Amino acid sequence: MTTTSEITNAQGLFAEILAQVRAGDEVVLTDRLQPFARLVPMPQRTSGPPTHLRIRTFKGYRVLGLAVSHSKLAEELFDRE
């Protein structure tokens, strides 16, 4: 559901507006009836296993990659099976 709030009213109702957004509603802020901002809830994270990253050295460069073994990384990079 989308709600509209005039900025002069929104300043005193900020906690209530945030509660609406947290509940999943969208709030459009207006200034003299002209929309200028939209508050929307953040998308829900997908429920999957966490991705573990680590910094490693590859050909003299420091790279951020998945925490996998060197042999698995070589297989992925060079298509070795």
Image (tube, grey):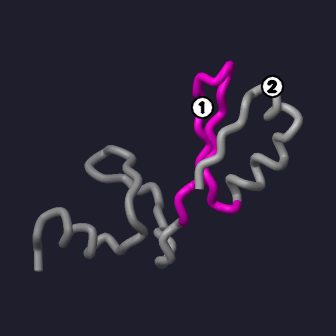
Q: Which residues are magenta?
A: 23-44
Res 14 quadrant in image: top right
From this view, report whether residue 26 is shown above or below residue 4. Answer: below
Q: Amino acid at mark 2?
A: Thr
Please name the residue shown 39% across and 65% down the image: 66
Per the image, label 2 sits on a secondary structure element best described as: helix
Per the image, label 1 sits on a secondary structure element best described as: strand
Badge 2: residue crowd in 10 Å (few <14, some 14–19, many ≥20) = few
| Relative horizontal placement of residue 18, taking residue 66 as reference (left or right) | right
Disc number placed over residue 8 in the picture, else none: 2
Expressed as whole percent of the image width and height from the top left, the position of residue 18 reads 75, 49
Please name the residue shown 60% across and 31% down the image: 37
What separation in Å lies between label 2 and label 1 (alpha carbons)? 14 Å
From this view, report whether residue 78 is shown above or below residue 6. Answer: below
Observer-nearest residue: 5 or 72? 5
The quadrant of the image that shows the N terminus is: bottom right
Res 71 quadrant in image: bottom left
Observer-nearest residue: 60 or 19? 19
Expressed as whole percent of the image width and height from the top left, the position of residue 52 reads 49, 68
Q: Which residue is mark 1?
A: 37
Please name the residue shown 37% across and 53% down the image: 57
Q: Earlier in the sequence, mark 2 or mark 1?
A: 2
| Relative horizontal placement of residue 2, taking residue 15 as reference (left or right) | left
Q: Amino acid at mark 1?
A: Ala
Please name the residue shown 68% across and 19% down the image: 32
> In the image, which is nearer the foreground, mark 2 or mark 1?
2
Expressed as whole percent of the image width and height from the top left, the position of residue 28 reads 62, 38
Observer-nearest residue: 30 or 60? 30
In the picture as drawn, the residue positioned furthest to the right comes out as 12
Res 61 quadrant in image: top left
Expressed as whole percent of the image width and height from the top left, the position of residue 22 reads 70, 58
